[in-house]
Amino acid sequence: MVESVVPEFGDTVHVEMVVTTKLEGGMRYKEISKDLGRPAPVPSIFIQGELVFEQTPGQEELRECLIKYIEKPAK
């Protein structure tokens, strides 16, 4: 689902898929879970390190969320 929305944003959005069945993905999942303070939900979507969706959103919901993050001023 993410792959169907992200191309609309060109180089503005970078996707990192974490495949937990591979060693590298398992290690990344462990890091994400540690930062979160609990096991990260699967599936989930993080944006800029923040857990935003604990389940797969609809295309329009994801699109609107990405637009808000892109338009939000940097801290």
Image: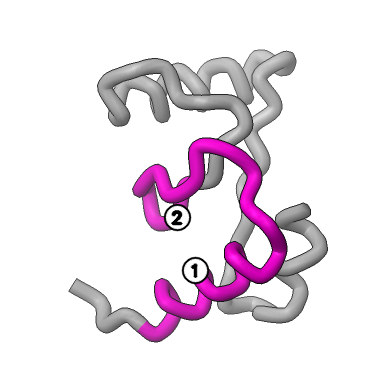
Q: Quadrant of residue 31?
A: top left
Badge 2 amino acid: Ile
In the rendering, at what x and y percent does residue 71 appear? 39, 85
Quick check: marks 1 and 2 in contact, CB under 8 Å? Answer: yes
Residue name at image x 62 percent, y 47 percent: 16
Would you identify the image quadrant in which residue 11 lies? bottom right
* Quarter in which the C terminus is drawn: bottom left
Q: Residue at x 42, y 77 (%)?
A: 68
What number of labels is visible? 2
The nearer-to-camera label among 1 and 2 is 1
Q: Residue 13: x, y in percent?
A: 58, 69
Q: Under tag 2, what secondary structure?
A: strand
Can you give x and y, in whole percent of width and height, for residue 32 in the image? 41, 29
Q: Which residue is mark 2?
A: 47
Q: Is residue 14 above or below residue 33?
A: below
Please name the residue shown 59% across and 26% down the image.
Answer: 42
Left or right, residue 4 beside residue 34: right
Would you say residue 60 sits in the magenta stretch? Answer: yes
The x, y position of residue 7, in whole percent, is 76, 73
Q: Which of the labelled discs sits on residue 65, or is there none?
A: 1
Identify the element where label 1 is drawn: helix
Badge 2 local density, few (<14 within 10 Å), some, or many (20+)?
some
Query: Which quarter of the picture shows residue 64?
Result: bottom right
Q: Which residues are magenta?
A: 46-71
